[in-house]
Image (cartoon, rainbow, N blue to C red):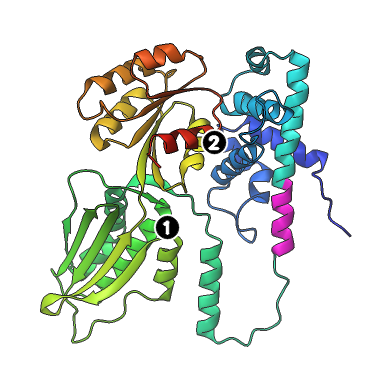
Amino acid sequence: MAKSTSPSKEFTEQVKQALEHLYDFSTLQRLPLAQTLAPVKSQAHKMPGHHLRRELLTAIESISPDEQSSMQSTDARLYNLLQLRYIEGITVQEAANRMGLSARQAHRSLRRGEESVAAVLWMRVQARQKNEPPASPVSTETGAARELSSVSTEVSLLDTHLEAIDIRTVLQEALKAIAPLAQNRGVEFEVDLPEKAVIVSVETAVSQQIFASLFSRVIGVAQKESLALRLNQRQDQAVVTLSYLPDGEASPVIVDEVIEQFVQRLGWTIRQEQVVNGRSAIVLNLTGQGALILVVDDNEGLVELLDRYLTGHDCRVLTATNGPEGLQLAQELIPDAILLDVMMPGASGWEILQTLRSQPQTATVPVIVCSVFNDPDLAYSLGATRFHPKPIRRDTILDTLHELDVV
């Protein structure tokens, strides 16, 4: 029987229900749609609700009109209504008022937008079902070949979502994970980490597992009190070096094909080499860091959407969901650009902007103000580099960052 090319009413209603609970993580976890869209169908995804929210945000973005489209076009109306209702979280009536629509027009267009999102997600479900391999006959591969093939499949199915994070934290968590093993072996690490944060775009769980696996393997072959872990930042790279003195004449292979595949999945490089005095070293280059963009906005969905807009465009995205946190990160890390909302609890975005401009270390950092209030004159008078009214379009943000030579 041929599969339907359009989503059923039931599927569309599931999508609408998920959109209505976009910020309710516990509810998203329980929705059938979360398992339907889970990246690995043969097993429950560890965070189906988180993945579902990302899928919804991506689907909304996929129907964004191109730059040549009029803001009054049908596509723009559907996209902006979805943004205002589900990402900004305002009522349909408020969205209608802002867009100059009647309540009836807004409800009808929003329904069409929901159907468009459902159609995008339905296509993904069908594409994945089409690509699922049939039950295979008994394999004639060797055990090692089957194992490597299984690893390759698992790596390819990884739901890697890069986020900007202080890599020191990942290393410290990996050290905690292997602490009992190190204690049992009587091994201690000499750890040398920079005082300042080293921000790298990573998939946290995968990167932590890579480090923990390397530490565990080295503990098994190293002499006691010979392990040294160092993190250095060199221009656009962060370099992690794990050196040790082998407990034997030859140093066994630590970096095998399994480790290499996971490392390559993150866009890193890794090598094992001999250094002075008989020591061996594992060197990881965490490359391609790019410009650091700080997004300060209390709207969690919009922050994640901006993260998705920017990740993959040669930049790292760091987020803060309140003004004080954003100000602290800006002062500590001196980002290449800041995207700032002005409507946040705890501190006005205007106050944050004035503080940024009054301090020497952040006075020249480009600040792009994003607000539901269309008041560019006020923004520029307080020191904004650019002003964009919400809802924000991906092309607008990217074009602005290109104009400012940030990306």
Look at 57% across and 53% down and name the residue there.
45
> Does the residue at mark 2 contact the one at mark 1 (Cβ under 8 Å)?
no
The answer to whether 284 is drawn above or below residue 275 in the figure is above
Give the percent coordinates (x, y) of residue 190.
15, 61
- Magenta region: which residues? 122-131
Q: Residues under labels 2 and 1: Cα distance?
A: 30 Å
Give the residue at the far left of this rendering: 277
The amino acid on which the numbered mark 1 sits, given as a three-letter code, is: Val
Q: Is residue 188 depicted above or below 218 in this figure?
A: above
Relative to residue 46, is residue 80 drawn left or right?
right
Q: Is residue 34 visible?
A: yes
Question: Which residue is painted at 26% across and 70% down in the image?
Answer: 282
How many discs mark residues in the rendered view?
Answer: 2
Percent of width and height locating residue 268: 37, 62
Neighbour tally class for label 1: few under 14, some 14-19, many 20 plus, Cα within 10 Å: some
What's the residue type where badge 2 is placed?
Asp
